[in-house]
Image (spheres, rainbow, N blue to C red):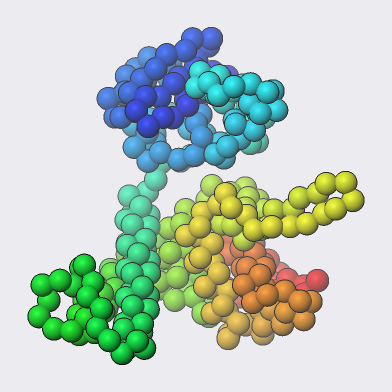
Amino acid sequence: MKVCGVDLGSVNDTVFFEGQVWEGSHDVSGWFALDERLPEDCEVVFEGRCAALEAVLGHRPLYSLEPGRSAQVRRALEEAKDDARDAETLAQLRQLRPRLFQPIRPRDPQLQHLRDLSRARRGLVEHRTTVLQQLQAVRRRGKEREKEWLRGFQGTPEEGLVCVLEVLRQEITRLESQIQQAGEKNPTCMWLRTIQGMGSTLSAEITGEMDEFTPFQRPSEAQAYGGTAPVTLASGNRKWVKLRRRCNHRARNALYLFAFCSLRFHPWARQYYDAARARGKTHSTALLALANRWVPILMAMIRKEDDYDPTRKHYRSPSLA
């Protein structure tokens, strides 16, 4: 098996292949030059994701390593930071520990469009929340405070903020209409919509951010990528868990919101949440644990290519333990 390790940089990429090391520009021209230099059956491995690189080298077997893994190996060997060594480490890890790498398949243009629409809507919703907080602050203080981005507006800051909110509302409504139309063309979205509490917006966001759940072989991989599974640490007799930081934060936010919506429609979800709260868990921790329980159910739906049915074995509600 021939493996090429690529250490991605902001300006230049460092490449290691069969004992040779060279640098190439971190752009499309540099990746086309790399493609011409490598044999057809060569795998390319790198850390994280790079959409442009994946588009150029999409005809090759591509594998991604969780960011920071090569740095962990470097610290374990007590070596200094070196781009060439990192590229070599990637190639060696692919041969010695292949399960650490996630295969990358070419992104579906329709799925990418759905993801872009969902992210644009999420950004506008967060902006709307900020404007609402500013409007509440202006009304609470009872005095006008001129903002940089409101200068030139003929009116009070309160009237300007209301105008901004109206523009955001119209834009969010337009994006939600586009998301609904795009989701109707995606079978994964339609399957997820069969779950009560899963609307067109959430189903599209989860489908886009989780890449239709296709890259994951086991539910634990999807739970780690989605950020719902906590990280367990141990030292001596001590053992504790903490929130996972290296994950898709947008996917975690979408799964978190869906878990909150599911409390209203699914009795087992409400029981699971109440049991977690009774054990002393906070509201956020209990909802994240519930989202973690939902991920295997969502994966079962996608693999079976079927609607949600709580009476079926592979959709059976998890225990409250």
Residue at (53% x, 9% y) in the render: 19
Location of residue 62 in the rendering, given as x and y in whole percent from the top left corner: 48, 32
Residue 66 lies, in percent from the top left, at 57, 40
**Residue 314 lies in what quarter of the image?**
bottom right
**Is residue 202 shown above or below 13?**
below
Q: Would you say 58 lies left or right of 80 here?
A: left
Observer-nearest of 191 and 147: 147
Query: Is residue 72 visible to us here?
Result: yes
Q: Is residue 298 above or below residue 69?
A: below
Which residue reaches farthest right?
A: 237
Taking the spot 37% from the left edge, 78% from the top edge, the residue there is 133
Q: Quadrant of the C terminus?
A: bottom right
Asked if residue 166 can be seen in this view, the reply is no
Q: Quadrant of residue 122?
A: bottom left
Q: Is residue 320 above or below residue 186?
A: below
Q: Quadrant of the N terminus?
A: top right
Q: Left or right: where does residue 142 sit relative to residue 38?
A: left
At horizontal 61% and vertical 35% (from top left) the residue drawn is: 69
Residue drawn at x 32%, y 50% is: 109
